Image (cartoon, rainbow, N blue to C red):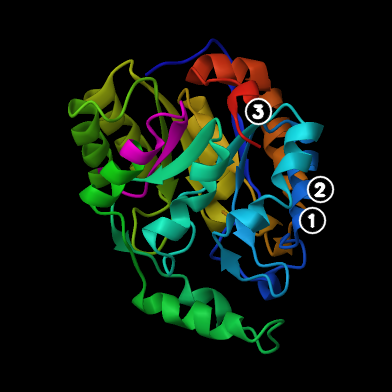
Amino acid sequence: MAKSSNKVIITCAVTGAIHTPTLSPGLPYTPADIARQAIDAANAGASIVHLHARDPRDGSPTGDPDVFAQFLPQIHASTDAVINLTTGGSPEMTVEQRLAASLRFQPEMCSLNMGSMNFAFHGMGGKIQDWKFPWEKKYIEDSEAFIFRNTFRDVARVYHLMSDFGTRYEHECYDVGHLYNLAYFLDKGLAKPPLWIQSVFGILGGIGADPDNVTFMRRTADRLFGADYVWSVLAAGRQQMPLITQAAMMGGNVRVGLEDSLYIGRGKLAATNAEQVRKIRRILEELGYEIAAPDETRRILALKGREHVKI
């Protein structure tokens, strides 16, 4: 696995498509709040900010590039962080909706989900009585029936449509089979090293958040990709900090953010994304690791540079 000395890259996933504003008052959903929290996370030590968009009227997930345009310029102007846009969006979005923002803004990075899967989070809403917006309750409950579509044709289409822009990918692998899917695309010449692999643990429908699974995913990636990849880990919910700390100690990089976990400690909601960044930075630095700056991250991942985006 490719690794740069003792440096650890911190990614912050600022606001995802699965949580609703009701579940956490800290979750940003207006453009102003998304911009502010992304900038604060970058200032706290995140060299990559991973971004979804929300409809500012009600906080519902959207792939509309015009909404992304309400916060991306401010983030780009105020930080040197790598901007990483979702192409995952929401399981309810079409592939066209999920791709629209990346096609328009041509970012340095975008996410790319490496396989179809059940993607359920209906258990999160079980204790909620008062919902902030009318769409939230049904959205949470309906996730029991969600299939997150990422067929081989869908994934190949993303590679082809983005191929002229120099954008590199955060390959999100929710299970071991997704690593083999990525190996298939590497063999076909669509995926190009160095591969940025984000191993995802703890999503219902994917591989569980277990330390043994982290080791298994790492060994599998080593066998499939050798020195052609750079590894990172995210873990959903309460296993976020333990598993990403384990990953760093195994030579990997880490992702935090309110997309992945709403909490900062046992039973305590995080107030901001930056709070999670500061916590993992403190843990890593106390363990003797250095935090990669944006320019170092660009070098490690062979990114095209912020001057080549259309933001």
The relative height of residue 252 versus residue 216 in the rendered view (above or below) is above
Q: Nearer the viewer, residue 135 or 165?
A: 165
Q: In front here: 212 or 170?
A: 170
Task: Inspect the image, locate mark 1, and give the three-letter code of the amino acid beneath it.
Answer: Asp
The residue that label 1 is drawn on is: 33
Determine contact: label 1, label 2, CB under 8 Å.
Answer: yes
The amino acid beneath tag 3 is Leu
The residue drawn where x is 43% and y is 34% is 169
Closer to the eye: label 3 or 1 = 1
Residue 146, quarter of picture: bottom left
Determine which quarter of the picture holds residue 170: top left
Q: Which residues are magenta?
A: 160-176
Residue that label 3 marks: 284
Q: Residues within 10 Å of mark 1 (few under 14, many from 20)?
A: some
Residue in the picture at 19% in, 35% down: 184
The quadrant of the picture occupied by the C terminus is: top right
Q: Give whichever of discs 2 and 3 has the lower sequence position.
A: 2
Percent across and percent down for residue 18 are 54, 65
Q: Is residue 231 left or right of residue 264?
A: left
SS class of the residue under badge 2? helix
Name the front one of labels 2 and 3.
2
Question: Which x, y percent locates residue 209?
Answer: 43, 52
Is residue 80 on the magenta stretch?
no
**Residue 139 rendering spot, x and y as whole percentages:** 51, 79
Q: Which mark is residue 36?
A: 2
Per the model, the C-alpha gap separating discs 2 and 3 is 24 Å
Where does the image place residue 310, in percent across and percent down from the top left? 61, 34
Q: Earlier in the sequence, mark 3 or mark 1?
A: 1
Q: CA distance from mark 1 to mark 2?
A: 5 Å
46 to the left or right of 99: right
